[in-house]
Image (cartoon, grey):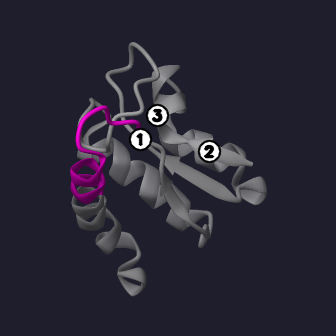
Amino acid sequence: MNIDCGHHYLVHEDLRAAVEKIEDKLVHVHLDDNDATADQSRPPGKGTIGREGFSKFITALKNVGYKRYLAFDIHPTENPDQALKESLEYLREIVKEFYPEIL
């Protein structure tokens, strides 16, 4: 199964609980952000999930032993290269706390 943190956030589902529900079936992760009103596929840090929300999500992935890809599912309309760069910087700060071996 794939999990998309932006989709779960949009329907007001706890991100940690969403990961725990499918932990043994989880094979792919989409990272994106929104303001909880629509599926906006914003870069992480450009919505309202916030650092705490992404930290809980990454912690849950670590706790269930997830060691596969983290993929950005973002659709910026302007400057996609800059959006990717900012997404990487934002997530690296969070991920390095939980997966320092991959950075």
Instruction: Report the predominant secondary structure element of the magenta stretch.
Output: helix
How far apart in space, not on screen, are marks 3 and 1 (Cα)?
10 Å
Q: Please report the bounds of the magenta region as a residue range.
A: 75-87
Amino acid beneath label 1: Ile
Q: Is-magenta flag for residue 17?
A: no
Observer-side mark, 3 or 1, equals 1
Question: Which residue is identified by label 1?
Answer: 74
Left or right: 69 in relation to 6? right
Q: Residue at x 54, y 31 (%)?
A: 8
Observer-side mark, 2 or 1, equals 1
Question: Which residue is identified by label 3?
Answer: 6
Q: Residue 103: image x %, image y %?
A: 35, 81
Q: Residue 50: image x %, image y %?
A: 26, 39
The one of 30 and 57 positioned closer to us in this rendering: 30
Against 7, residue 57 (above or below) is below
Against 96, residue 8 (above or below) is above
Q: Residue at x 26, y 48 (%)?
A: 83
Left or right: 72 in relation to 26? left
Q: Residue 18: image x %, image y %?
A: 60, 40
Question: Which residue is identified by label 2?
Answer: 3
